[in-house]
């Protein structure tokens, strides 16, 4: 059972609602939380209460929690490969990585074992597995969904978001996480197409083809500050990871590669964090100026097609996703056809709390590529 850590046999309600798969970094009352790590599992006690983000699921008519799903260890990786729990099988793209860190939630949805997956996204951990498994993933605006009861990686970047097979189901997932979400509204009046060097030409062509088919107003844009997002993102990620998980280092049950990543944050100083905060603010100001002209930004989710599991060790898949975690912006990824046998994934990002516009724009694109 590489997809599921704990499978629940909750009876279906008389009015059938979504079956929800919950990443095992999110507390469910009465169940332990492992964060995909043996060291955590060995000392975990059953949670006394649900994580706050599950309140909407518990209150939704007919919704059931199907269980807790596997993940990249300590939420700290983009491939979904887990040496302790095993790697979830990517049923949509057999032999390819499921993506991380919300690998099990994506795999469960792709296999039809859940209607909605709930994952966390710190640098792309909802959108990357959605892209790898050929489904939809929605990163929410930072702060929109409460993080109480969610295993932290880097609180300055952490978010919770849904995965689903369709945009409409992803919107349903967001309404479970935030019952105040009113659903998709209207598509963006203008879409800015961002081109990032180093993207596989077949993926860029797939993104351009989907945008053309949608008949949305699209124009090319530039973001001069794009490359400057890497350094502050890494500072905030590593600083947070050390403070969240540093206590585990030195005890058995943490994989060597994960331990090395956590240790990389040990020597980050408060001055470096302060500088990263200033760089983050500059990036947010640049985006605010652009969003005044282009309501939504379109780009690929991944710069390459998902690698084979055997080639996963050197795969770093968050180059096009982490800048939106730095800004806190919402972003949605959805599959679009490419010329080869594998689908590409298109990513849309927008201003804070524009999930309604992102979902509506993604639905237009989804319908256009399905014709």
Image (cartoon, rainbow, N blue to C red):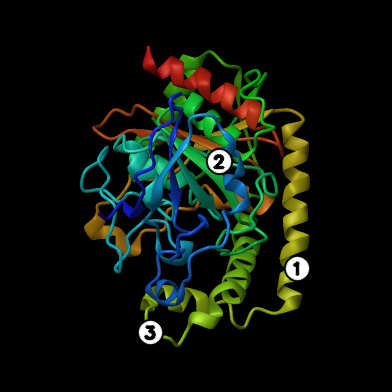
Vertically, is 134 above or below 215? below
- Mark 1 = which residue? 275
User: Which residue is nearer to you in this view: 206 or 367?
Assistant: 367
Q: What element carries label 2?
A: helix
Figure check: 50 above or below 289 = below
Q: Position of residue 334 (x, y in %)?
A: 45, 32
Residue 105 image point, x, y percent: 40, 46
Q: Distance between the residues labelled 3 and 1?
A: 35 Å
* Residue plotted at (59% across, 36% down): 59
Mark sitting earlier along the chain (3/2) = 2
| Residue found at x 57% / y 22% | 361
What residue is pinned by disc 3? Answer: 252
Q: Mark 2 points at which residue?
A: 58
How far separated are the C-alphas under marks 1 and 2? 41 Å
The 10 Å Cα crowd at callout 2, few under 14, some 14 to 19, many 20 or more, is some
Q: Is residue 196 above or below residue 41?
A: above
Find numbered disc 3 in the image and state the secondary structure of the residue it sits on.
loop
Decide if residue 199 is on the left or right side of residue 228: left
Task: Using the image as rendered, state which of residue 244 and residue 192 is in the foreground.
Answer: 244
- Say few, some or many: other residues with alpha carbon within 10 Å of mark 1 (under 14 / 14 to 19 / 20 or more): some
Q: Is residue 194 visible?
A: no
Residue drawn at 64 percent across, 66 percent down: 236
Report whether 112 appears left or right of 360.
left
**How far across and down, in percent of the image, does residue 336 sit?**
39, 28
> In front of the other: label 3 or label 1?
3
Q: Quadrant of the C terminus?
A: top left
């Amino acid at each position: 059972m590489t997809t599921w850590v704990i499978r629940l046999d909750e009876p279906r309600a008389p009015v059938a609602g979504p079956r929800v798969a919950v990443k095992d970094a999110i507390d469910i009352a009465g169940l332990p939380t492992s964060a995909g790590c043996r060291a955590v599992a060995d000392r975990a006690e059953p949670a006394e209460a649900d994580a706050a983000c599950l309140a909407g699921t518990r209150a939704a008519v007919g919704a059931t929690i199907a269980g807790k799903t596997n993940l990249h260890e300590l939420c700290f990786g983009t491939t979904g490969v887990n040496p302790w729990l095993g790697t979830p099988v990517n049923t949509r793209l057999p032999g390819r990585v499921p993506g991380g860190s919300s690998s099990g939630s994506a795999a469960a949805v792709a296999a039809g074992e859940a209607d909605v997956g709930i994952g966390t996204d710190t640098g792309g951990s909802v959108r990357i597995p959605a892209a790898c498994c050929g489904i939809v993933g929605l990163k929410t605006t930072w702060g929109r969904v409460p993080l109480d009861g969610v295993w932290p990686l880097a609180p300055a970047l952490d978010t919770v978001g849904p995965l689903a097979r369709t945009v409409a189901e992803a919107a349903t997932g967001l309404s479970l996480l935030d019952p105040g979400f009113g659903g998709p509204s209207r598509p963006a009046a203008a879409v800015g197409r961002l081109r990032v060097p180093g993207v596989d030409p077949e993926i860029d062509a797939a993104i351009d083809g989907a945008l053309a088919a949608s008949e949305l107003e699209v124009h090319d844009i530039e973001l001069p500050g794009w490359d400057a997002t890497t350094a502050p993102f890494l500072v905030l990620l590593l600083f947070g990871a050390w403070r969240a998980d540093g206590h585990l280092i030195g005890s058995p049950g943490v994989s060597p590669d994960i331990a090395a990543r956590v240790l990389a944050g040990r020597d980050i100083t408060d001055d470096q964090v302060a500088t990263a905060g200033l760089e983050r603010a500059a990036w947010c100001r640049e985006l605010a100026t652009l969003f005044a002209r282009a309501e939504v930004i379109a780009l690929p989710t991944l710069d390459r097609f998902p690698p084979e599991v055997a080639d996963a060790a050197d795969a770093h898949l968050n180059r096009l996703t982490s800048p939106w975690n730095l800004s806190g912006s919402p972003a949605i990824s959805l599959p679009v056809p490419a010329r080869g046998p594998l689908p590409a994934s298109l990513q849309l990002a927008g201003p804070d709390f524009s999930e309604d516009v992102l979902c509506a724009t993604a639905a237009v694109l989804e319908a256009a590529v399905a014709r």
